[in-house]
Structure formats: C-alpha cells, structure tokens
Amino acid sequence: MELLFWLLLVLINCSGNAITTWMDANRSGAASMQWWEPWVWEFSSGLVWLLLVPAIVWFSRRWPLHLDNWRQRLPWYLLASVPISLLHVLAMFALRMLAYAAMGERYQVGVWVDELLYEYLKDVRTYAAILFCIDGYRFLRRRLQGEAQLLAAPDEGPPVEPIEHPERLLVRKLGHDFLIATADIEWAQAAGNYVNLHLRGHDYPLRITMAALELKLDVACFVRVHRSWLINLAHLVSIEPLEGGEALLHMSDGSEVPCSRRYLPVLKSRLSEDRELSLPA
C-alpha cells in the first residue's frame, strides 16, 4: 500500500509537471524543445526521489521529529538534505544523459556550482514535502490502529493496579478508549521514540523507549531478544539458528522476529529455566 502511494504520487506529479512544461513551451514559442524532453526531465527526477524515499523513511524513523525535540534534531535534518540533494542531482543528470543519448541528442549541464545550488533549493522543498507525507501517514495510521499509553495515577485515591508494572494499557482509537492486557502483547518493536506493541494482528504505538518498556513488563513473560525487539515467551513457537550466532524467532501469529547474537544466550537460558520450573518435582 505504501509503495503504491509513492508510485501514484510520482506518476501524477511528474505527468502533471511534464504536461504543463510542454504547454508553457508551446505558449512561449520554444520550438527547439522536443516533446519528450519534459517527460525525461520530470521522470528522471521522480524516479531518483522514489529510490531515495526508503532512506528518508529510515532516517525519520531512526531520529523522529517531535514537539519536544525538534530544536535539537531540525539542524540534523537540514544537514541530511545536502547529501540527499547531491545524490538526487547526480543520479538525475546521469539518467537524463542516458535518455538523451538514446534519442540521439546530448544533455547539456551548465555551470555545476550554479546547477547544484539551483537544484538544492528545489530539492529541499521536495525533501520537506516527503517528510510531511511520511509523518502524516504515521499520524493517520496511529489514529486508525490505535495509540497506546500507560495508565496514569488517579487524581484521588490509590491506583487500581501498580503504575510501575501495569497489567493493562489504555488504547485510544478513533475517539474511543479501551484497555488491553499487557500479557496479550505478543512482541514489541522499537521505532524511534515509540515502541509498536503487536497483539492479535494489530500494532499499537506506545511512546516509550524499549529499555523503559522492558522494566515495566512482567519479566516472567517477556524477554529482550534484540536491541529493537522484545517478545512474549508464551507466543514463541520455534528458534531458527542463523549464521554468525544469530537466530530467527517464529511466533505464533506467523511473524518472524530477529534475535541477535548478544541476546540469544539469554533467551535460551530463560527457556531452560521455564522448562525446569514446569517439570514435576
């Protein structure tokens, strides 16, 4: 679905720009322009942006922007725009040269410093638009799937359950609140400042670090298996060893969770302890 969105966005945007460029050229009497040139210009740029989107998605997931950190991270986003624009321009010019050569023409590049600066001023706006689309999609997805949060202490009286080790989490979805049991969480994956809690085929983002979540969950049920992953032992089906001392964990819902070499001995030790405890005396 995400790939289809980006494909349609590039197709519609590039086609619209190519058509308007051709119409403007005819209106101004630029007879030297060939009909295929606007299409090469636009789609060479759009194709490269399409290839750069996964890197931008990864960067924004690794260091997400929020209201509480945008002052510290915005300079890094601006700094990242420079190599992204450079990659975009160089790859775009290479594609145009190939396309022009295929048509028996030669693509002319002006003064490189001027061209790079001109393209950067355009690229930084496209870069910002891509980030806006990514954050907008994530916001909409959290609202549709539901966003989890820890239960807060009541204004009056003692809490119904321990706040430090809650048995339930509050999930808000489409304006409605409901509770989920922490024991029902099958696995969790870190995503920037959030941790996605997976249960019954749904992911519920919880704004917390993986280390903090690990301290709040029941250690008898959950175990850390990777820097970015944590599983519920009750939903572990099998362990598939991999080269390099790592492993792939097969979960009851069909998901595959990576287990790093660092955490694999811990997982096996926990499983051995649980098996010994389950044996009759």
Image: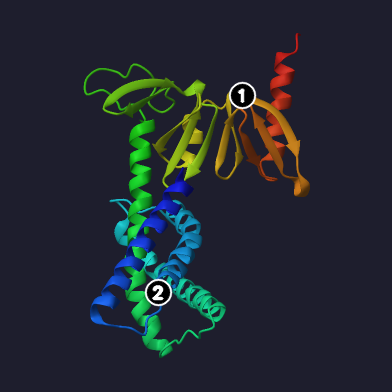
Q: What distance separates the C-alpha of mark 2 from that of mark 1? A: 59 Å
Residue drawn at x 36%, y 70% as measured from the top left: 123
Residue 258 is drawn in which quadrant?
A: top right
Graded by Cα atoms within 10 Å as few (under 14), some (14 to 19) or many (20 or more), the crowding at tag 2 reads: some
132 left or right of 271?
Answer: left
Of residue 13 and residue 157, the one placed in the foreground of this image is 13
Q: Mark 1 sits on what residue?
A: 235
Residue 241 is drawn in which quadrant?
A: top right
Q: Earlier in the sequence, mark 2 or mark 1?
A: 2
Q: How is the protein colored in the picture?
A: rainbow
Residue drawn at x 29%, y 68% as measured from the top left: 20
Residue 52 image point, x, y percent: 48, 62
12 left or right of 251?
Answer: left
Of residue 228 and residue 109, the one placed in the foreground of this image is 109
Q: Amino acid at mark 1?
A: His
The image shows residue 237, relative to residue 55, as above or below, that is above
Residue 109 image point, x, y percent: 44, 86
Q: Amino acid at mark 2?
A: Trp
Which residue sits furthest left? 156
Graded by Cα atoms within 10 Å as few (under 14), some (14 to 19) or many (20 or more), the crowding at tag 1 reads: some
Which residue sits furthest top? 281
Is label 1 in a helix, a strand or a loop?
A: helix
The image shows residue 102, relative to residue 256, as above or below, that is below
90 left or right of 273?
Answer: left
The image shows residue 2, relative to residue 201, as above or below, that is below
Q: Mark 2 sits on what residue?
A: 35
